[in-house]
């Protein structure tokens, strides 16, 4: 039949027509496969009503319920299945299975006796047939799936016909229509989260008198206007999930009537103002999530709830101190406290008790200070501790908890060694302690963290060598030890099959060569070894890493030529390559430029911003220091569209290869402070998104290509200290560059330099000085000045003679006018002649 492991599809018609006396055995001779849960008990020699998941009517013997949820069933679900012959079936639960590639058959609509139907999370796909709306007796309908969708108006038809619905859950289903005006008055649970419904939510939804749970979250085009008076559902409503809808404005005081409310999630709703005081009277609240709004006011006012298990106020404008923690000892059930990204101040109180069940404490990105109190290190069930981006000082104490999974204390002023207890946490997969003042060595026991996914110890005062065993941590994706005082050679052997994506050892005192075992990091995106004392030839073998996008070797002691390679797809994905401030020599590596495939594409019109190695942007951002636009800048995250080649401050010689013009995605090109010569290739005008071009302090000669004036994105140009001659191009970006872009090129003329190019306004003229050496140019200048002085002397003699004649003969007026005009023309020509030279 084209399917496998679907036992109930094999149920022969006896299962559909059993109508024996209750005293007779219910023998079923169906085909079955004894391999999965529930169906393992299905045996044709026994009464089918005794099978796991099969329930029969005690009087008629007819099958009235099939509960095969999470039975690991898989395969195609065909419309000719015997299942659809169970005409008296009232309950059917197929959720949690795998019917991948199967449509929901219209024949489900023929099971007219159904009161409960659950097809959720079973990988059905395609359209939900309109026939489902014929099931008018349904009390419960659950079809949660992101692979399903409604035709226009079919959702409204469904609600119109199913007037007895008590529970409706269509989470993730693509409804893509306006929300209907009317719902079943019997509804107790309504779940339409992430269904792309839009329009204005009818207020009558809040007045459904039996409503217990309402979930409309993650529908940003759905406008929700809360009732300003008492809701009809206020006595029964226990769960309200409205995060991610458009509910701009304040939290209305009508919420105070929801006295039965246990769960309130209204995050990402653009709510503003203070939390109304009547909300404090909701004493049954267990979960309160107000994340990512614009709420304000003292945080202490919120803590009147004694039954809280979850409190999340992330990313608002709450202020004040955490003093309430010390006198409120009734939160014995509190498991999560998240007050991150607010404006909280002061220390964390030291005399806190009653939080033995706290599992996650997240207070990052505030203005908290002082030491981290000892009660935090004593929490027995803590698995998430996030105190990032505050002003905490002092040592990190030893943890008593053995349950830690995520510890992030970066960007504080913590000091002392890394606690030993942190290195014995079996479940720890995020350890982020960067940007502090931690000292001491990195103990080899850190490799006991066998499931560690992220290790960020950057920007501290750690010393000693890099532990050898780090290369054996098979699940490690991010390894950042940058900006410490680590020394010695990198003798860590990176094992085959590792999962490393980011390695940052920059800013240390590491010596020796680049370890060959890096070739085993086949998923590596970023390798940053800059600002060390490494001494090696260029490790061109790194180009075989298929996903490498950033290679930084700047400020080391690399040497020798970068030889061309015939290896295919070498550095094919590279976006940033920085080899500056080394001792590389020879010609520029034209063979490498040819293989920079990712740079040959410009993606400036992409709708979304993508970042290199953006694995977990909350706990870790892949920063990079680059020299661009004449400045050393730290990019907190590197856009995939930001492409850089920096080969400056080396000993490269020869010509600039024109093939660089093919790298049209380049944003920064820095070849300065080398020994390059020859002309600037006109092909650089193809770099349409180039923002910074630095060719300074070389031996480039010839004219600046006029085609470069077409580079409309160019913000910084530095061609200083070369042997360039001729006229500076005019127009567009070239009109914005100042004298510093061209200084040290005595043969250049035109704005912004004081040497005029001559000719018509705005049209640069060819110079006659091209090809002259310095001696010839000096002689020419002397001759030109001699001519000027001779002309000036003759003019002075003639002028004095005319004045004498005028005074002695009382010249006529017309002669006076002619003389003034002639004198003006002579002076003008002299000034022009002077400017030319």
Image (cartoon, rainbow, N blue to C red):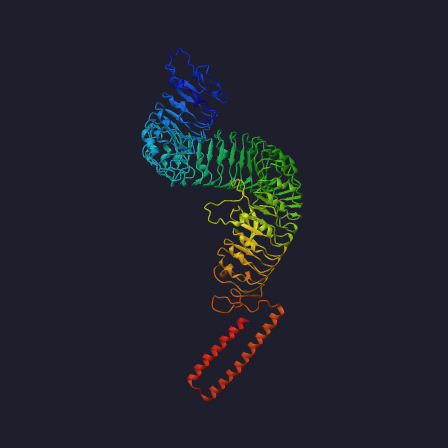
Quick check: 321 left or right of 393?
Answer: left
Instruction: Please identify the quarter of the rendering in which residue 669 is found.
Output: bottom right
Total residue callouts: 0
**The C terminus lies in quadrant:** bottom right
Q: Position of residue 822 (x, y in %)?
A: 47, 80
Q: Nearer the viewer, residue 500 or 415?
A: 500
Instruction: Please identify the quarter of the rendering in which residue 472 is found.
Output: top right
Instruction: Please identify the quarter of the rendering in which residue 29 is found.
Output: top left
Q: Nearer the viewer, residue 653 or 235?
A: 653
Quick check: 692 left or right of 157?
Answer: right
Q: Residue furthest bottom?
A: 809
**Residue 212 in view here:** no
Up the image or down, 707 lies above or below 497; here it is below
Q: Nearer the viewer, residue 303 or 588?
A: 588
Q: Position of residue 341 (x, y in %)?
A: 48, 41
Q: Position of residue 675 (x, y in %)?
A: 63, 58
Q: Nearer the viewer, residue 663 or 583?
A: 663
**Residue 110 in view here:** yes
Quick check: 238 left or right of 337?
Answer: left
Q: Position of residue 80 (x, y in %)?
A: 40, 25
Q: Residue furthest front?
A: 1
**The N terminus lies in quadrant:** top left
Up the image or down, 697 lies above or below 208; here it is below
Q: Residue furthest top?
A: 23
């Amino acid at each position: 039949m084209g399917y496998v492991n679907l036992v109930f599809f094999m149920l022969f018609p006896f299962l559909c027509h059993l109508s024996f006396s209750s005293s007779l055995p219910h023998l079923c001779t169906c085909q079955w496969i004894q391999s999965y849960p529930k169906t393992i008990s299905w045996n044709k020699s026994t009464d089918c009503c005794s099978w796991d998941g099969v329930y029969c009517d005690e009087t008629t013997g007819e099958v009235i319920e099939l509960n095969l949820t999470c039975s690991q069933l898989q395969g195609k679900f065909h419309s000719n299945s015997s299942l659809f012959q169970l005409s008296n079936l009232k309950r059917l639960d197929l959720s949690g299975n795998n019917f991948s590639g199967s449509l929901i058959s219209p024949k489900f609509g023929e099971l007219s006796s159904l009161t409960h139907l659950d097809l959720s999370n079973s990988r059905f796909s395609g359209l939900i047939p309109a026939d489902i709306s014929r099931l008018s007796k349904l009390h419960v309908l659950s079809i949660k799936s992101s692979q399903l969708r409604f035709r226009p108006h079919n959702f409204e038809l469904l609600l119109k016909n199913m007037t007895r619905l008590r529970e409706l859950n269509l989470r993730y289903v693509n409804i893509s229509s306006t929300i209907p005006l009317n719902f079943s008055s019997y509804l107790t649970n309504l779940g339409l989260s992430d269904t792309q419904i839009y329009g204005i939510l009818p207020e009558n939804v809040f007045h459904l008198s039996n409503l217990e749970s309402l979930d409309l979250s993650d529908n940003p085009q759905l406008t929700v206007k809360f009732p300003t008076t008492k809701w009809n559902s206020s006595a029964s409503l226990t769960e309200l999930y409205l995060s991610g809808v458009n509910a701009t404005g304040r939290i209305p005081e009508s919420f105070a009537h929801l006295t039965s409310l246990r769960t309130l999630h209204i995050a990402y709703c653009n709510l503003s103002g203070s939390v109304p005081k009547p909300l404090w009277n909701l004493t049954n609240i267990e979960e309160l999530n107000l994340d990512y709004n614009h709420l304000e006011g003292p945080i202490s006012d919120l803590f009147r709830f004694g039954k809280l298990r979850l409190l999340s106020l992330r990313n608002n404008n709450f202020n004040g101190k955490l003093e309430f923690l010390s006198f409120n000892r009734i939160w014995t059930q509190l498991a999560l406290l998240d007050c991150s990204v607010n404006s909280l101040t002061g220390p964390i109180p030291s005399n806190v008790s009653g939080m033995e069940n706290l599992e996650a404490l997240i207070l990052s990105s505030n203005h908290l200070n002082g030491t981290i109190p000892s009660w935090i290190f004593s929490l027995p069930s803590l698995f998430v501790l996030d105190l990032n981006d505050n002003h905490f000082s002092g040592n990190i104490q030893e943890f008593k908890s053995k349950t830690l999974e995520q510890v992030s204390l970066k960007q504080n002023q913590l000091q002392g060694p890394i606690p030993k207890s942190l290195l014995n946490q079996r479940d720890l997969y995020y350890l982020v302690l960067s940007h502090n003042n931690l000292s001491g060595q990195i103990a080899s026991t850190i490799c006991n963290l066998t499931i560690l996914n992220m290790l960020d110890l950057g920007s501290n005062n750690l010393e000693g060598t890099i532990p050898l065993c780090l290369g054996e941590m098979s699940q490690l994706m991010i390894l950042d030890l940058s900006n410490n005082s680590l020394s010695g050679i990198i003798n860590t052997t990176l094992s085959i099959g590792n999962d490393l994506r980011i390695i940052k050892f920059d800013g240390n005192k590491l010596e020796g060569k680049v370890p060959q075992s890096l070739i085993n990091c086949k998923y590596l995106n970023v390798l940053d070894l800059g600002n060390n004392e490494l001494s090696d030839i260029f490790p061109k073998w790194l180009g075989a890493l298929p996903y490498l996008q950033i290679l930084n070797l700047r400020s080391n002691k690399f040497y020798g030529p970068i030889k061309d390679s015939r290896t295919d797809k070498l550095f094919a994905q590279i976006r940033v390559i920085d080899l500056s401030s080394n001792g590389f020599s020879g010609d520029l590596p034209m063979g490498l430029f040819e293989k920079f495939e990712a740079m040959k594409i410009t993606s400036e019109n992409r709708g979304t911003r993508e970042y290199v190695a953006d694995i977990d942007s909350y706990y870790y951002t892949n920063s990079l220091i680059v020299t661009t636009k004449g400045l050393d800048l730290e990019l907190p995250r590197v856009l995939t569209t930001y492409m850089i080649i920096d080969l400056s401050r080396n000993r490269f010689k020869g010509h600039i290869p024109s093939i660089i013009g093919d790298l049209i995605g380049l944003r920064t090109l820095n070849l300065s402070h080398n020994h390059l010569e020859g002309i600037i290739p006109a092909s650089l005008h193809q770099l349409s998104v180039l923002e910074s071009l630095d060719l300074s302090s070389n031996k480039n000669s010839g004219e600046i290509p006029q085609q470069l004036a077409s580079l409309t994105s160019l913000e910084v140009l530095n061609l200083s200290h070369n042997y360039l001659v001729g006229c500076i191009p005019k127009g567009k970006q070239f009109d914005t560059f100042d004298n510093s872009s061209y200084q040290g090129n005595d043969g250049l003329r035109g704005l912004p330099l004081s040497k005029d190019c001559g000719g018509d306004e705005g049209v640069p003229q060819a110079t006659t000085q091209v090809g002259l050496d310095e001696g010839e140019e000096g002689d020419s200048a002397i001759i030109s000045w001699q001519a000027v002085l001779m002309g000036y002397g003759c003019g002075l003699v003639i002028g004095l003679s005319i004045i004498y004649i005028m005074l002695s003969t009382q010249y006529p007026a017309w002669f006076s006018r002619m003389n003034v005009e002639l004198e003006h023309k002579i002076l003008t020509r002299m000034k022009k002649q002077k400017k030319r030279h």
